[in-house]
Image (cartoon, rainbow, N blue to C red):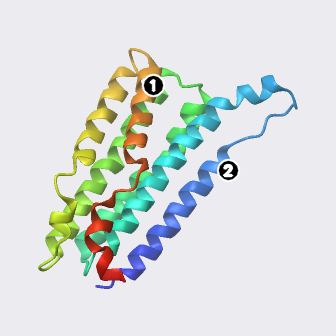
Amino acid sequence: MEKGRLEAFSDGVFAIIITIMVLELKAPHSADLAALLDVAPAFFGYVLSFTNVAIYWNNHHHLFQAVERIDGSVLWANNVLLFFLSLVPFATDWMGENHFATLPVALYGIVLLMPALAYYVLARRIVRLQVNSELSSALGEDWKGRISPILYIAGAGLAFVTPVIGELLYVLVALIWLVPDRRIERRFHGRSE
């Protein structure tokens, strides 16, 4: 199967997810600083979620640079990833609208956990299909992929102690991934030139 249609569809879904998130941002109804501060939680949630979705898009792009072929299991694994990412705008809006209350912050962590797990499954399905590929060794130990779910679970649980701890852990995961995953890029850089 060709991977081009999967990439095009995925890019479209990523764009829609980001569009939905930005449309949920509401401008204040007055022109004073206090009104702007009232929407600060929603804006912070948007920035964090945009960063997370952009990280997935970057890593998805890098992963598919190394893909030689796909099958139905990759299509479904990709759709599961996109499904869980499509829940990010809802969780972001709920969290921002409720000024980072306990339950919305905990749910946000679970919503971030699910695409992390789905991305792991997608990468493993792709590796399984590649014949004589260096992709498996390029992915390596994947310490970021292993620590991220642990931090999301910890953040969701600790949100019940104090939501700010949960948020800080979610920011930490985003910071860990902010530099794109270069394992694939380094391994396959020479091939694309």
Query: In which quadrant of the rendered view does residue 30 lie?
Result: top right
Task: Note whether 186 is above or below 179 in the view shown.
Answer: below
Where does label 2 land, which residue?
23
Going by the image, does 153 lie left or right of 40?
A: left
**Amino acid tagged 1:** Leu
Task: Note whether 2 is above or below 76 in the view shown.
Answer: below
**Image coords of residue 191 (percent x, y):** 29, 81
Tag count: 2
Q: Secondary structure at mark 1?
A: helix
Going by the image, does 65 lie left or right of 96?
A: left
**Image coords of residue 133 (percent x, y):** 16, 76
**Residue visible at 41% across and 26% down?**
166
**Image coords of residue 188 (percent x, y):** 28, 74
**Image coords of residue 73 (percent x, y):** 23, 70
Farthest right residue in view: 31
Query: In which quadrant of the rendered view does residue 185 lie?
Result: bottom left
**Residue visible at 40% across and 67% down?**
61
Q: Secondary structure at mark 2?
A: helix
**Residue visible at 29% across and 54% down?**
118
Query: In which quadrant of the rendered view does residue 112 lie?
Result: top left
Q: Confirm whether residue 18 shows in the render.
A: yes
Going by the image, does 129 lie left or right of 118?
A: left
**Amino acid tagged 2:** Leu
Where does label 1 land, which residue?
103
